[in-house]
Amino acid sequence: MSTRERPGRPLGTGGRTVPAEWIDYNGHMMDAYYFLAFTEATEALLDHIGLGAGYRAETGCGMYTAESHLCFHASVPAGAELCYSSQLLGCDAKRLHVFHRMTVGDGPEEHRQLVRALAAEHAPLPRPAAAGRRIAMPGTT
């Protein structure tokens, strides 16, 4: 089951590496690009629920943002890996109330947990004889 399909968790809605042009003279991501990043998350959410670009092309109808709030919890440097997740807090016939999260680092914690779980699952397997060999160049030791 993928991150996007896990019940009880926010929906994984993408991510990106922060480009240098998003960075200000202080070395931090500029405010406008936080909104751009969350726009990417919104588009992924809308695609997931069938209300994205395909829906617009098919019906001529589309979604738009009526209100948005942004909270800054930490600065983001160039080259940082962003991961987005989205949680649908509520909806009615015309509105979605969505909460996006952005994490910075080498991937969200759930991926580290999956890697640790897989490592534990594979720990009892016999170690391959060739594991740990090194490649030697002629004339070197």
Image: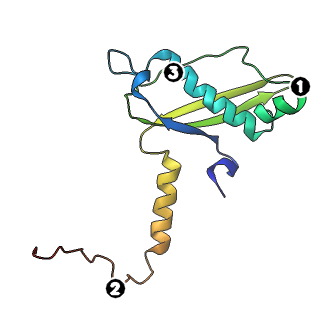
> In this figure, which residue is indicated by the disc labeled 1?
93
Mark nearest the camera among 2 and 1 is 2
* Alpha carbon distance from label 2 to label 1: 61 Å
Q: Position of residue 28 (x, y in %)?
A: 37, 21
Q: Position of residue 21 (x, y in %)?
A: 42, 22
Q: Position of residue 113 (x, y in %)?
A: 49, 55
Who comes first in sequence, dot 3 or dot 1?
3
Provide the secondary structure element on which disc 2 rests. loop
Dot 2 amino acid type? Ala
Provide the secondary structure element on which disc 1 rests. loop
> In this figure, which residue is indicated by the disc labeled 3?
33
Q: Is residue 123 above or below residue 116?
A: below
Q: At 41% across and 84% down in the image, what residue appears?
A: 126
**Where is residue 50, by image quadrant?**
top right
* Alpha carbon distance from label 3 to label 1: 30 Å
**Where is residue 51, by image quadrant?**
top right
Q: At 39% across and 26% down in the image, what residue appears?
A: 20
> In this figure, which residue is indicated by the disc labeled 2?
129
Dot 1 amino acid type? Ala
Q: Residues within 10 Å of mark 1 (few under 14, many from 20)?
A: few
- Colour pattern of the rendering: rainbow
The quarter of the picture where the N terminus appears is bottom right
* Alpha carbon distance from label 3 to label 2: 50 Å
Q: Tell me if residue 83 can be seen.
A: no
Who comes first in sequence, dot 2 or dot 1?
1
Who comes first in sequence, dot 3 or dot 2?
3
Dot 3 amino acid type? Tyr
